[in-house]
Image: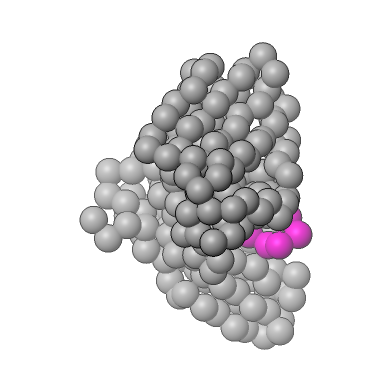
């Protein structure tokens, strides 16, 4: 399977701060990238997709893609306690990283 | 739309028994995926179907696992015989290829 690497964390940030989640991948030919959020005991939920180099913003979420460096990141601005979850990076739909656990401290 | 529907939500079975997991994808989605999630290995792709045809089953652990999609609205994942190491959460997801998934609620399988 294709390699998708994420820091498992846990990552802790105070409420209102920016949370930065990173993901690297091995297949240079990958064209599509996704971020999912998974609350404990629940199924993953798609929050962002990105296909082109650069930034893509959706509300408090910004996905960043750099194909030359083979990394994709997710920034969460004004972090809220409700953002506490595991964030999964997926490449070319199929291949998932093991996820980064985020805790937002009130 | 009711989303991706999986059944059962929980399954406890004894080693050696046959287990069948069921999935109804979202209407109009042409791709269906079966994943297994464990703490140690994360989300592993087992098999995926495109237009009801199995495209890649290289993730199926061994011959004990089989999957079918007889029509666009139904798929099954069968484990026979089941073993304790098969204990995991099994997710079904559907999409149109190239887009992100919608996951079902999952089936938590425990083999004792």
Write down the quadrant of residue A96 in the picture. Answer: top right
Residue furthest to the left: B1
| Scheme of colours in the image | one colour
Residue closer to the observer: B106 or A84: A84
**Residue depicted at x 66% and y 26%:** A71
Q: Magenta residues, as a range?
A: B34-41
Relative to B108, residue A27 above or below: above
Residue furthest to the top: A68
Task: Please state the horizontal and vertical placement of residue B76, each as a whole percent of the image.
Answer: 47, 62
Task: Please state the horizontal and vertical placement of residue B30, each as a whole percent of the image.
Answer: 36, 40
> For the stretch drawn in magenta, what is the main secondary structure?
strand
Q: Is residue A60 visible?
A: yes
Left or right, A105 with respect to B106, comes to right
Relative to B29, residue B13 above or below: below
Q: Does the magenta-highlighted stretch encompass residue B20? A: no
Q: Is residue B36 visible?
A: no
């Amino acid at each position: 399977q294709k390699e998708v690497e994420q820091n498992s964390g846990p990552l802790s940030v105070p409420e209102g701060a920016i949370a930065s989640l990173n993901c690297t991948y091995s297949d240079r030919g990958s064209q599509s990238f996704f971020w999912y959020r998974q609350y404990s005991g629940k199924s993953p939920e798609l929050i962002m997709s990105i296909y082109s180099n650069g930034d893509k913003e959706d509300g408090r979420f910004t996905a960043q893609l750099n194909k030359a460096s083979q990394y994709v990141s997710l920034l969460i601005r004004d972090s809220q306690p409700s953002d506490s979850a595991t964030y999964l990076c997926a490449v070319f739909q199929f291949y998932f990283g093991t996820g980064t656990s985020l805790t937002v401290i009130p | 739309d009711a989303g991706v529907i999986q059944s059962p939500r929980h399954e406890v079975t004894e080693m050696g028994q046959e287990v069948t997991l069921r999935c109804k994808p979202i209407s109009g989605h042409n791709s269906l995926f079966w994943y297994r999630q464990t703490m140690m290995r994360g989300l592993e792709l087992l098999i995926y179907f495109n237009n009801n045809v199995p495209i890649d089953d290289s993730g199926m652990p061994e011959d004990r696992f089989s999957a079918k999609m007889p029509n666009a609205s139904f798929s099954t994942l069968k484990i026979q015989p089941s073993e304790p190491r098969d204990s995991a959460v099994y997710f079904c997801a559907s999409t149109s290829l190239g887009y992100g998934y919608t996951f079902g609620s999952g089936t938590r399988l425990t083999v004792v």
